[in-house]
Amino acid sequence: MNSQASILAPRPNVAHHLAFDLHDPAAARDALTRLATLATGDKIVVGIGLSLVQVLGKSINGLRSHPQITSCGIDTPSTPRALWCWLRSDDGGELLFLCRKVEQLLAPAFRRAESQRLFLYTADHRDLSGYVDGTQNPTGEDAIQAALVSGQGKGMDGSSFVVLQQWQHHFKQLEAIEAGGPAKMDDVMGRTRVGDVELQNKPPSSHVARTDQDSFDPPAHILRCNMPWADDDLQGGVMFIAFGHSFRAFEVQWHRMLGLDDGITDALFRFTRPITGAYFWCPPVLNGKLDLRALGM
């Protein structure tokens, strides 16, 4: 598949999330053309938002805005952006200069609206809650089928749809659950923190029970590339990054997490909430640069 290489690559040690608003629509095509030559290797993933597609006078089948949903007393945000870049490296200095390069290429058409440093926590990729993140992620051919568009023709095959949600953990609430003993947190997650073993008798509100990908008809497989974040105020959480050949698999899981199916909300909401929510389309690659034919470029 002629996808952006970083979509299927292992998660890096450090990364940076940048999201941009469109400032000068007349300059958007030139800025994207400049960015297209940079975003082809293992250092960056580029996602195009619905508003940018519309400014270019085109449409991408399946691309829409992240829904804003209120359910069972839980408010979830929709924070659409025109453009997203996920910059990746194993070196913090290289990452800094790569971020600066991207901003320079995109000016003056785009202005940075979100910026967040990301990192891996422990060698086995744990969330800041202490639980392994990405268990049962598809691999190999299964990952390709889950994450990439196929059978839709030139300019679309090899592309991907990505969901971005920044979740903020409320550590005092997490610590209050932990104070009840290890089993209390294991019940929230549906897996054990030690050993990463799925519980035999997990509560229906547990995260694993809510998002069991094979429990949907048809199965709802996505490729998750989540990474923790933290800021200078000692706040932190996880950047949820999920690639799919459409948004369907994410949305059926999301609806169940929010209790839209049966009124049972995901126990994750006891200590963490999303503070952003956005959808993007990640173009394929052709001849060493982003393939923007679907956008008329």
Image (cartoon, grey):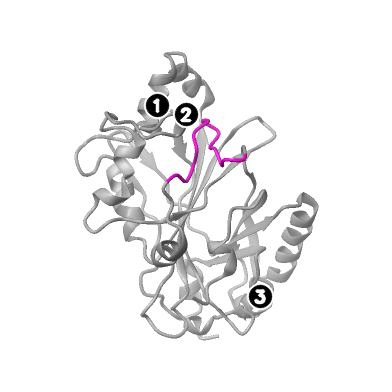
Q: Disc 1 designates what residue?
A: 186
The one nearer the camera, 219 or 88, is 219
The percent position of residue 233, horizontal first and vertical second, equals 66, 31
Q: Secondary structure at mark 2?
A: loop
Q: Earlier in the sequence, mark 2 or mark 3?
A: 3
Q: Amino acid at mark 2?
A: Arg
Q: Secondary structure at mark 3?
A: helix
Q: Residue furthest left?
A: 262
Q: Earlier in the sequence, mark 2 or mark 1?
A: 1
Residue drawn 40% across the image and 60% down it: 65
Above-or-below relation of 213 to 98: above
Query: Which stretch did the figure color magenta?
Result: 123-135
CA gap between label 3 and label 1 equals 47 Å
Q: Amino acid at mark 1?
A: Asp
- Would residue 281 be counted in the magenta stretch? no
CB under 8 Å between discs 2 and 1:
yes
Q: Quadrant of the C terminus?
A: bottom right
Q: How packed is label 2: few (under 14 Cα within 10 Å), some, or many (20 or more)?
A: some
Frontmost of labels 2 and 3 is 2
CA gap between label 2 and label 3 equals 45 Å
User: Residue 287, labelled with which disc?
Assistant: none
- Would residue 130 be counted in the magenta stretch? yes
Above-or-below relation of 179 to 148: above
Q: Disc 2 designates what residue?
A: 193
